[in-house]
Amino acid sequence: MANKDSAGKTLPPRPAPRLYLATPEVDDPAQLASELPTLLAAADVAAVLLRLKPTDQRTMISRVKTLAPVIQNAGAALLLDGHVELVARAGADGAHLNSLAALEDALPSLKPDRIAGVGGLTTRHDSMAAGESGADYVLFGEPDANGQRPSVEAIAERLQWWDELFEPPCVGFAASREEAAEFARAGADFVLVGDFIWADPRGAEAALTDVAQAVLQAYEAAFGKTRTSPDKAGHG
């Protein structure tokens, strides 16, 4: 069925959700640098979230600089998990912030040239405030400091609510292939995948290809087949 707006006009088909790949915590980047080209060629990955093992700034910048060209040459954006102060110096494309307060602190140094995404949004009010502040995307469903997260149903409901009402892209944090598919059905613009990809006994490439297929199939079942196109945040 064609997508129609409130005036009854037919809207262009919505693009399929894209993947957002979170790395393990990186200490030695060499192995990851060797794996990433194959991984990023295996599926439509819009961005990579680089988690850095805390150490001195010079070492962390060096690790980012090792990985940045590998990721960016594959057409994906490189975002740091926190570490806003390193983004420009290390050549990253932006940062992911873990609270509304962190986002607001980071915006002056990231905007307008770099991406500022945000999670840790426990209420709808915080989510709306993040969007109004200028977040390039909002993330729903990631674990809190105690490892707790909302139910899959609650995350899907929040994604659907956001997708229907707001313009900035929404990201669903998926802890499994099944969750990734559920969030694609709910209207996520991106699906963040991480630990379960790297832990898959078949290997990360097989896991990533599998989840990409699951996301596309779920999206097509919910919204109908359409072409992929650049996303709303301009990562594509």
Image (spheres, grey):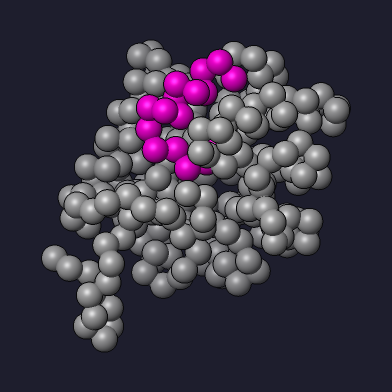
**186, above or below 47, in the image:** below
Which residue does the image show at 40% across and 15% down from the upper left?
203
Q: Say whether residue 64 is left or right of residue 143.
A: right
Q: How many labels does the image show?
A: 0
Q: 196 and 40: which one is in front?
A: 40
Name the spot of residue 153 as percent of width and height, x first: 34, 51
Which residue does the image show at 45% across and 21% down from the upper left?
38
- The rendered magenta stretch, by its main secondary structure, is classed as helix
Q: What residue occupies the far left of the structure in this picture?
A: 1
Q: Say whether residue 28 is left or right of residue 48.
A: right
Q: What residue occupies the far bottom of the structure in this picture?
A: 7
Q: What residue occupies the far front of the structure in this picture?
A: 73
Which residue does the image show at 28% across and 67% down from the upper left?
12
Q: Say whether residue 29 is left or right of residue 234.
A: right
Please provide the residue range marked out in magenta: 33-48
Name the spot of residue 74 as percent of width and height, x first: 51, 33
Quarter of the rendering occupied by the N terminus: bottom left
Which residue does the image show at 47% across and 42% down from the upper left?
46
Name the spot of residue 24 as percent of width and height, x first: 58, 25
Would residue 22 be visible to someone looking at this image? no
Give residue 116's quadrant in the image.
bottom right
Name the spot of residue 85 as percent of width and height, x first: 81, 45
